Structure formats: structure tokens, C-alpha cells
Amino acid sequence: MKKMAFLFLALLLTAFSACKGKSAEEGVSFEGEKHLIIAANPDYESFDPGITYEPYGSTVIHACYDNLFEFQGSLDNLVPAAAESYEISADGLTYTFKLRPNIRFVSGNSLTSADVKWSFERAVNLKGNAAFMAEGITGIETPDDSTVVVRLKETNPSFPIELAFVFFSILDSKAATEQGATDAPDADVTDTARTWLDAHSVGSGPYQIETYTPKVEVVLIRNPNYWGPAPYYDRITIKTVMDANTQLMMLQAGDADIAFNLGPEQIKGLAGGSGITILDAQSLTTSFLLMNRDPAIGGPVADPRVQAAIRLALDYAGIQALAGPGMSTPMAPFPLGLLGSLPPGDVTGYPKITEAKALMADAGYANGFSTKLYVPTNTVVGVDLVTLAQKLQNDLAAIGITAELVPENVTISLETYRTGRQSLGLWYWSPDYPDNNSQLAFLPGSSVGLRANWTEAQNPALAALGKQAATEIDTAKRVALFTQIQQAMIEDTPFAMLLQHTSQYAVKTGLTGADYLELYQMDLKRIAE
């Protein structure tokens, strides 16, 4: 017995000594473990797939959960994931999916059609920001454990693309239910799993959440039950590092493998350096100025003539220069790279101060007015939003608008933005899925349009065009409809489009698979050395 006790103690000490000497803040990893560290300025609010709507949340959730479809490598390569195959009915209203066999969740439970149905219905009934994506679904059937039948009320050419979004992630219904999750119609009130799901995952993806410390870091570890090829890294830590210079120093010191939110100055300083590789890609992310159409909230800003004046007063070339190389200004909220998007706008000749002042006078504000400009205090694709807001503040002053900046943490500012209570707001948007149907959210009466209190009644013709585009399956007709919509929005919109961003970030040399992929930012399972 003494020999056994001594042997146990020796083994215990050996295991303990294998731990690396990292601080508590950095977490514990083991000798020989492959550990990827990403320094980023994330915007996540939750890791509950039914709630998450922010880009960085998608990065984590995609690594931890499977969808029926996913993008691999590029937005041109949509492939079945948890679905092994699928069929579409002749009328385009019924999709039948055959699930891949032998997929198991982190818990060891098998993924079945019942989990797909439960996950979709829970996400809908949570009534989160992405719930609109399922509005076209009229029913889900599960004739057997490996078959899912989804019926739509009208044709939707982007439906397979939408299924790759994290809203349609597949959860282990048994494990989630044990933590208070429900797919009941009143799930928005009775579901109590969100807090638990913010620090744990119940998916079948290559990773699982080990720990999450808000504003500090989220740590992912391998899912030993993953059905696909094992990812290269045993552990991934995404550290919250708000300052771009700090991200740069961490990368240069070897304390991070990826610095994800570098600005033009940091990128310029890295040029020609050794051991670090700069990556860039055309992003689908856009930045825009929201101008509220409700006079009770926007005051003078609500007048369409004032909004037109603001668009004329902006120094778009200066905004592009501030943001860095490769930037462009969309003519409407339809970014280059998606089917039917018009080329970027010609910013030559802006700002047009004389024309803008004439519109201000026509609206009764020749002497200007004061308002508030809300801005989240984070960085978007390397661009500091507060710095950009200061540029807008200076541009508006040229036509007599005094804009008081209201910088807020993104989680605080999102609430008033999403409920339409900001007079002026500097915001950003990444498509929920890479198709211009996603951009129809900016139309009157749609989700983003309503954040500016732009109702369908204010422009019913434009709203009708959007509904037609959403269901059209003929490619040429879709392009024609999107062209009409964009041309109409040049004349009437409560938005001033500012930038389509180019993503620039830096990785340690030798890292592969870290290419930018819009829907997930990066596909963590593809990163290797």
C-alpha cells in the first residue's frame, strides 16, 4: 500500500511539474501543448448561438458548433457540414437534409434531427436580433433521426447561405435543456441557459469553451469527440486587448500569435519587419452614419433635407485616408463583393459645402443646430471609431452642426442603437450572410432601417422593391432589382455610407489558415503552423 501511495504521489507531482509557469491571467497550459493566442478588441455580448449577433461572437461559436452548411476557405465555397447531402423541391419551398452519421456533441450524445429542429425553434423563440432570418420557415419535420425537412413560405435564394450563420448552429438539446434551455414559444421569457452558455458550449465543433472572463479572455480547448480532422491547436485564447499599440507589442514580444485590430499606423510600422506577416483582404464590413427619422428623437436631424446636407458635407476622401489604404465608399449599403452591388462612389468634389448649406437653409436651419453623435468605443477592422467620429464632428461643424460626441462601451451603445433611440450614430455592419439579401435590412421597415425609425410608410415603393428582391431566384432579375434599390437609396436614405473596410492584421510568420473569412472573421480550426 505504501508503494502504491508513493507511486501515486510521484505521478501527481510529475503531472503538476508539467504545467508551464504562466501567470493566472494567462491561464494554465501544458508542456507540448500547442497554444494559439489572439489579441483582439472583440464586441461579443454572448456565446449563446440563439442570441449572438456580433462578428467576434461568430468567431467563437463557429469553432464550437456545427451548422448544416459552412464556408470553407472563401465565400465562394459553401459546403454541407453537419448535413451530408440535401435536396430542394421543384417549387423551391422544401429543403430535405440528410445528416452526416456519427457526429457526437461534447457530452458524447449523438447529433440527430431532433437536435436540429430543437435548436432552430429555440433560436426563433428566443426572439433575438437574428430571429428575422427564420421568418420564412413555416415548418420543420424530422421523419427519422438522420433527416430534417424544412418548409419555406416563399422562395429564398439565399437560404442555404443563411444556414451557415451562427443563428442556425446545432446545440445538444439534452445537455442544453439540463441547463435551463427551452424551445417553448415563450423561450424569450422562460429560457434560463444564456448565462451558462456564455461560459460553456454544447456543440459538436472542433473546439469547446473552457473558460470565459468578460473583458479579459475566452479560452477554447479541443473537443475530443469532434467528427472531423483534429484541429492543429490544443488550446486557443482570445485576449481582449483594446489598444492597437498593445496588440502590436504583444505580437512583437511573442506574447500573441495574431494581432487582429491594428490600424494604419501600426501596419506601416511593421512593413519590412522580420518574423511578422501582414495579411489584408477586402472586407464586407461597412461603416455608416445613422440619422434618425423620428423628430422626437432626431430633432432637426430627422428632416430628410438635413440628412441630404450631411451627406454632402462629409469629406469622404479624408475619411478614407484616415482609415488607411484600400478603403472605398459604397454608394448604398451594398458592399462590393456581393451579387448586384454597384461600384464604389466617386468621392471627387466632396465635401460640397455650398450645396449642403443651401439644404440646411431650406430646412430652416441656416444657423445650424446642436445634436449628439453616439459612437461605440471600439475598433472596427483596424479603424478606431472614436477617431472617425471626431472627423465627422469636424465635417459637420462646417455646415453649422455642433455634434457632441457620446462615446460608449459597445454593449451599452448597442441597446439604444437597436431600439432606435440615437439621434446620430456612427455604426458598422457586417452581413449576417454573404448575400445582398442580408443588406435588405437597411430598407424602410426592416431591422436596420427601423433603428433609424425609417418606416415602410415613409417609402413604400422602396420597401416593395426589397420584398421582391428577397424572393427572386433569377440571377439577372436579382441584379436588376438590387441596382434599382441602390439608385433609390442614393436619393432617399437615413444613412450616410462612410467606408467599406479593408481588413489588415498581422500574424507571426509561418502561421497558415489565418486568412480573413467574413462570416467568421477567421476559421479557427484551419489555423496551423
Image: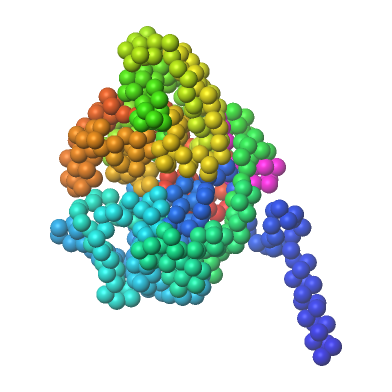
Residue 282 in view here = no
Residue furthest to the top: 354
Residue 466 horizontal/vertical position (percent): 23, 40
Residue 206 horizontal/vertical position (percent): 50, 63
Residue 419 in view here = yes
Residue 256, magenta (yes or no): yes
Residue 366 horizontal/vertical position (percent): 39, 10
Q: Nearer the viewer, residue 27 or 51?
A: 51
Q: Which of 503 and 440 is in front in this view?
A: 440
Is 423 located above or below residue 213 in the figure?
above
Residue furthest to the front: 296
Residue 477 horizontal/vertical position (percent): 17, 40
Q: Which residue is drawn at 83% across and 82% down?
A: 6
* Image quarter in which the N terminus is found: bottom right
Residue furthest to the right: 2
State how the image is colored: rainbow
- Residue 173, by quadrant, is bottom left
Q: In this view, does 476 lie to the left or right of 106?
A: left
Write down the region rendered in magenta: 250-264
Tally the numbered discs.
0
Q: Which of 262 and 418 is in front in this view?
A: 418
Q: Which residue is drawn at 69% across and 57% down?
A: 27
Q: Residue at x 43, y 30 (%)?
A: 423
Q: Which residue is drawn at 23% across and 58% down?
A: 152
- Residue 11, by quadrant, is bottom right
